[in-house]
Image (cartoon, grey):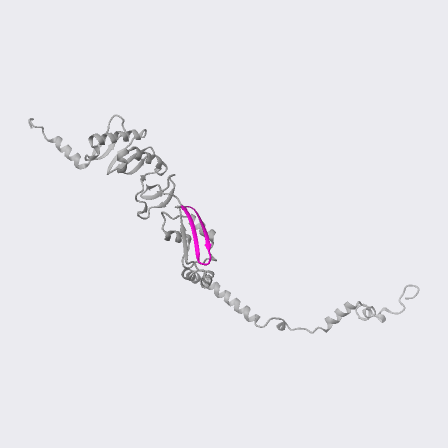
Amino acid sequence: MDGGGRFSQPLNAAGTPGSGGFLAGLRLPRILRRFSSARRLRPAVPIEARVPRLAGTALIAGLAGGIAMAGFVASGRYDSFVAENGRPLDILARLAGFGVERVTITGISRMYEREVLQTAGIDWRSSVPFLDVDQTRERLLTEKLIASVSVRKLYPNEIVINQVEREPAALWQQNGEIQVIAADGKVIDDLRDERYLNLPLVVGAGANERLEEYLRLVEAAGPLGSRIRAGTYVSGRRWTLKLDGVDIRLPETDPAAALARLVRLERENKLLEKDIIAVDLRMADRVVVRLTEEAAAARAESRKKPKKGTAT
């Protein structure tokens, strides 16, 4: 530069910007020169050389497999396969020796083992590692007869189920259907077989909620209690007891006292041994009986016959 601050030679001689000469006149740091040299000397690598061998084949095969699996599932054949053989993970676990070979059930009383297993969803297709114990427990709790339950695994091949069953107290019939109820009247099962046939039977709307009252009446019947077959709750007000084919109609108030009258009549007069189909105890000052059709017909016929010594 001269004293006036001007370059002593044209800029294009020392190198104009963009010509390379300007940068050549500057001293670049060594690491930048090395980096610039390395970039200029690195040869171009084709893309096919940078991709692993057979990667394209594997990608195409994976895509084809995914499409095939999607079609397999969509067609319903996967569900059929699982229903017949179990889930793929369970199959692998069984092959490895972790299939469910034993199920121990404690606390079982009224239920059958096959019912517990069916509700739990456990069978020969199951495996211990992939059994969801929380899900199995939730399934078992859908069974009305089971009050509480726990499920745990014992490797390699056992499942343990500890359950507490609700205690059935009576049968309840309504609208032609018979269900099993607990002492509080809650429905806990359907009448499906002979297991519950010896339980007391109550009939009618609301009879399940008055079970305790019915059982007290059976107890109040004393020696006749064992002969009571069922109790019908009538119009939400009173009970009619079925006793050896005879209907015992009780009053709304103090039905136990009415039963005490019946016990006395049976002891003194063998009332229930007669040809009757109903005894009405709803009136405190009298007992009304209804005869069988045969007995009623015979009584009517006897009234038609003239008494001895009377003119016809």
| Residue 163 lies in the magenta stretch | yes
Residue at point 43% right, 49% down? Answer: 162
Q: In this picture, which residue range is highlighted in magenta? A: 147-164
Q: Quadrant of residue 307?
A: top left
Q: Position of residue 152 (x, y in %)?
A: 46, 52
| Residue 284 lies in the magenta stretch | no
Nearest to the observer: residue 212 or residue 223: 223
Q: Residue furthest top?
A: 285
Give the tally of numbered discs. 0
Magenta segment's dominant SS is: strand
Q: Position of residue 96 (x, y in %)?
A: 46, 63
Q: Position of residue 78 (x, y in %)?
A: 44, 62
Q: Quadrant of residue 235?
A: top left
Nearest to the observer: residue 65 or residue 105: 105
Q: Residue furthest right?
A: 3
Vertically, is 139 above or below 270?
below
Q: Quarter of the image containing the C terminus? A: top left
Residue at point 23% right, 30% down? Answer: 265
Vertically, is 160 above or below 8?
above
Vertically, is 48 above or below 96?
below
Q: Position of residue 278 (x, y in %)?
A: 23, 34
| Side of 180 relative to 99 (left or right) | left
Q: Quarter of the image containing the N terminus? A: bottom right
